[in-house]
């Protein structure tokens, strides 16, 4: 911690905006990890199997309860379709499409900001580097010969510390972007596949649910 504090102290003004970017990156990463790995993740095969069993049994209320109990994008999309199953087939598909339009952006939001913030941190570090070099050479030009080496070392230290701080923010942000983007795409594919399997199965066996006395 002492070395980090010393680096921050010698890095100049641009260490502050880089630190602000770093705080935002950490906040986005924590929120996305919680949402994508814990809140949005569901065992799709298990959920689809449970729904298939209840649909085959003609248990509409059971199917609605099963999908409603799954606090996940896939569960909410299927739940929306099952609520309309006693209407026309087009109503079921429309309800699921509408639910998908609500759920998909929740999976994809904020993650793309990590790539942008990585670039911002890197460019801000570069700007700090250039600023430090300008100050350094300006000070050397007007300094006493005996002080030139110290002034030059001080300016270069500021420039290099700012570059390092920017990279410490940019590299992890880019790595987390790649990991979270991969997880997002995996969940999107899983939701699309699971919803399609269920809607096809429900529509093929819709007569069993339409004749159900359950709500």
Image (cartoon, rainbow, N blue to C red):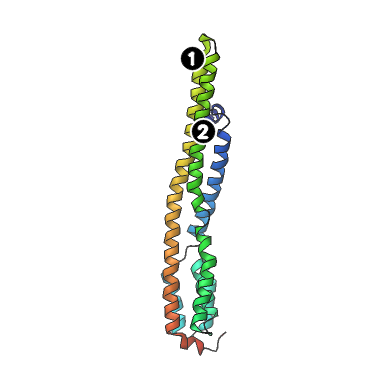
Q: Looking at the image, which is closer to me, 11 or 130?
A: 130
Image x and y of residue 25, in percent: 53, 46
* Mark with earlier residue (1, 2): 2
Q: Which residue is mark 1?
A: 149
Count of numbered tags:
2
Residue annotated with mark 2: 127
Residue 11 position, x and y percent, is 54, 29
Q: In percent of the image, x 44 and y 54: which residue is there?
A: 181
User: Can you tell which of label 1 and label 2 is closer to the viewer?
Assistant: 2
Q: Residue at x 46, y 50 (%)?
A: 177
Mark 2 element type: helix
Q: Are marks 1 and 2 in contact (CB under 8 Å)?
A: no
Q: How many residues crowd around disc 1 within 10 Å: few (fewer than 14), some, or many (20 or more)? A: few
Res 76 seen here:
no
Residue 144, horizontal then vertical, whole percent: 54, 10
The residue at 50%/70% (across/down) is 75
Quarter of the rendering containing residue 183:
bottom left
Give the class, few, some or many, for how many residues have Cα within 10 Å of label 2's Cα (few <14, many ≥20): some
- The image quadrant where one finds the C terminus is bottom right
Residue 97 appears anywhere in the view: yes
Rendered position, 56 above or below 198: below
Using the image as rendered, state which of residue 159 and residue 176 is in the foreground: 159
Residue 159 rendering spot, x and y as whole percentages: 50, 27
Q: CA distance from mark 1 to mark 2?
A: 23 Å
What's the residue at 56%, 43% (across, down)? 23
Q: Is residue 166 above or below residue 177?
A: above
Q: Is residue 11 above or below residue 90?
A: above
Q: Which mark is residue 4?
A: none
User: Dot 1: what SS?
Assistant: helix
């Amino acid at each position: 911690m002492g070395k980090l504090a010393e680096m921050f102290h010698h890095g100049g003004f641009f260490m502050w905006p880089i630190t602000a970017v770093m705080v935002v990156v950490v906040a986005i990463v924590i929120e996305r990890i919680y949402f994508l790995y814990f809140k949005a993740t569901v065992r799709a095969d298990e959920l689809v199997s449970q729904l298939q069993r209840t649909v085959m049994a003609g248990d509409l209320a059971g199917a609605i309860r099963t999908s409603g109990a799954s606090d996940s994008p896939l569960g909410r999309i299927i739940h929306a379709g099952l609520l309309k199953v006693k209407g026309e087939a087009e109503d079921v598909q429309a309800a699921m499409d509408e639910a998908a339009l609500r759920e998909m952006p929740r999976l994809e939001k904020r993650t793309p900001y990590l790539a942008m913030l990585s670039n911002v941190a890197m460019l801000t570090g570069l700007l700090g580097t250039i600023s430090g070099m300008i100050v350094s050479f300006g000070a050397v030009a007007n300094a006493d010969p005996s002080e030139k080496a110290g002034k030059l070392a001080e300016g270069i230290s500021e420039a290099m510390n700012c570059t390092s701080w920017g990279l410490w923010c940019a590299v992890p942000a880019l790595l987390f972007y790649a990991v979270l983007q991969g997880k997002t795409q995996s969940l999107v594919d899983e939701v699309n596949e699971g919803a399609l399997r269920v809607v096809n199965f429900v529509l093929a066996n819709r007569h069993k649910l339409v004749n159900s006395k359950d709500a």
